[in-house]
Image: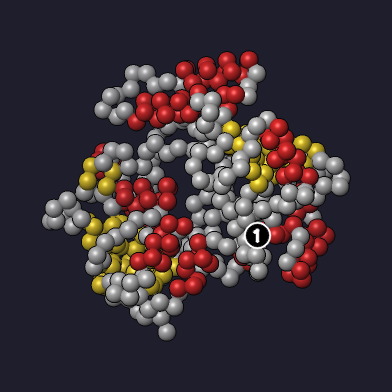
Amino acid sequence: MRGGTSGIVVANRLSEDPNVQVLVLEAGQNHIDNPMVRIPGLCEGLKKTDGLKSELNSRGISIAHGKALRIQCGAQKHQMELEDPPPRTWIETFKRKCYNIIDNPFSGNPVGAFSCLASIDPKTKERSYSATAYYVPVAYRKNLRVVFGALVGEIIIDGTKAGQGAEGVQYQHDGHIITVKARNEVILAAGAFQSPKILELSGIGQSNLLEFYGVDVKIDSPYVGKNLQDHLVCTMGFETEEIMQTLDDLVRKDPQAIQAAMGEYLLHKTGPYTSMQPGSYAYLPVINFPFKEGQETLNELLYSTEPVGVDLSNPTAIVYHRIAKSIFEDREDSSAAFFTIPTQVVPARILSPGNLLQFLFWATSFQSEPYCLTPSRADLFTSKAPIQATNLSLIPNT
């Protein structure tokens, strides 16, 4: 569980052994042939929001935890040619400030600027992601089965075993609730949002919270579903010269721009739809750059947010603040990401006229508020169909 970036890779590796039967339960549908997934420039259009929330001052926040055999739009980067003005200027500017990365930026603790690599197949000019790289090439294996549209309800815990081991999974599929028994192990790889939710629905979590929702407590683990960390992001837009190509017309959904871009992509595999943005990136220590007022504000934030009067039996808030504070105060290591996107980034989609280059600042978060991810069990299981029990005997591919 599930067919995400980690889950599908693990399934690929495990099924290399023909004696091992592997079942992947994916909540989403098979979108491998969906043009919105295959074409690099269209992937961002898959991101949606649940609407405007009063707690967020009527803002909507896009949270990437969609259902699909891993699409992962946000983590894919497009390699922009250094002959283009923004990447070339970006690299040269940071180089003059002695913040240029010579080696692989993903090899350790990078500090400096670089141009992002592509996750695009160089021959087909389509997106390359975990499903196409790790599932499609091995989908023929008779010992590997992926069930799409499978909504996992709980991990079945055998309380008679020492340590209360997982012995199977119950999930909903096509209006039926199905139970599968695992011969070896159950692997939970549902991501930061869904993994704790599945654990809680399985009776693993904070006991008083589970009891409130009517879930039988199997293991009292108070930290499940808490301490979700997120990034702080702020943006600035700069109007560009007319000769510079941006994606603003496509973001505005200009019919002529969309038709021209799609025609160029389908005929020649070139043009704006081969771009996945962002292109220029930099990891930098924030503390080295603010003016005096900014330094004072940063110091005030670091010290004013230090937890006080915290229950020592739950020391995570103190630990998280200590870690974040040490990161922000480090003048040698990076504490934030800076990057550019060749279009406007506006939450409410109220676009300004003209073409803009957006500069984004993505900081390490030291906010450690608890988040309850547990819905009522009734929200997941509304079918009145009888439970179908089966062993983990996979149907071979034909």
Q: Which residue lies furthest to the right in this view?
A: 242
Closest to the observer: 246 or 120?
Answer: 120
Residue 47 appears left or right of 252: left
Residue 302 appears left or right of 253: left
The residue depicted at 47 percent of the width and 17 percent of the height is 304
Which kind of residue does numbered mark 1 sit on?
A: Pro
Q: In which quarter of the image is the N terminus?
A: bottom left
Question: Which x, y percent locates residue 8?
Answer: 43, 63
Question: Which x, y percent locates residue 237?
Answer: 73, 36
Quarter occupied by residue 234: top right
**Residue 353 in sight:** no
Residue 383 appears left or right of 158: right
The residue depicted at 81 percent of the width and 63 percent of the height is 260
**Residue 105 in sight:** yes
Residue 104 appears left or right of 5: right
Q: In which quarter of the image is the C terminus?
A: bottom left
Q: Residue furthest front?
A: 102
Q: Residue furthest bottom?
A: 398
User: Disc 1 on helix, strand or loop?
Assistant: helix
> Which residue, given by chain and number where applicable, does mark 1 sit on?
40
